Amino acid sequence: MLIQLNYTYKRFIKTNCDLHSMKYLQPLSLFLLKNLKKYLNFILIKNYQLHLFLNSDSILNVIYFLKNSIYIFCNQLLDITVVDRIEFLQDGLRWEYVYVLLSTYYNLRIFVRGYIRYYQFLYSIIKLYNSAN
């Protein structure tokens, strides 16, 4: 099974798949990197899906931007997952959260990921998506 792995870091896109398949994801990842550069750690393009890794407590700002941007328009929240990462215990990053967003207009799935430290909490996005309740 061939996994196509691409990542974006500081405006450089590393890719190992053909450019025809990346026709829409490359400009979109550069658009996200330009507008969310102070919130993003890096962007990963894997199996034609975007994975946004956040570097701080800015989940509300990023989710609000993804929902209301006309170039992305993520109008559905599919899943919220929190994974206990015991292997990151020494770094103080105990839990990883993953929000799965879907843009039905562009047929695009975006995974918003980040880490939670001890005695830290996530802000609720119920005001943005009713399915988060």
Image: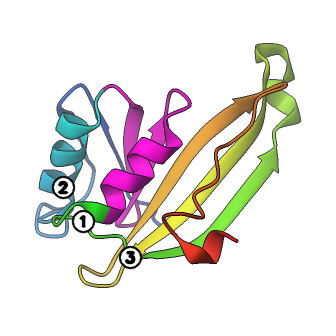
Foreground: 49 or 74? 74
Residue of label 3: 75
Residue 126 relative to residue 41: left or right: right
Mark 2 or mark 1: which comes first in sequence? Answer: 2
Amino acid carrying label 1: it is Ile
Query: For the point 24% across and 45% down, which residue is it?
Result: 32
Q: In 3D space, how far apart are the residues under numbered discs 2 and 1 (Cα atoms)?
A: 8 Å
Q: In 3D space, how far apart are the residues under numbered discs 1 and 3 (Cα atoms)?
A: 9 Å
What segment is highlighted magenta in the picture?
38-67
Are circles 2 and 1 on residues that touch, CB within 8 Å? yes
Q: Position of residue 105 (x, y in %)?
A: 25, 84
Q: Dot 1, crowdedness within 10 Å: few (<14), some or many (≥20)?
A: many
Query: For the point 35% across and 64% down, which residue is it?
Result: 67
85 above or below 26?
above
Residue of label 2: 28
Query: For the point 23% across and 25% down, which residue is it?
Result: 10
- Dot in front, 3 or 2: 3
Residue of label 1: 72
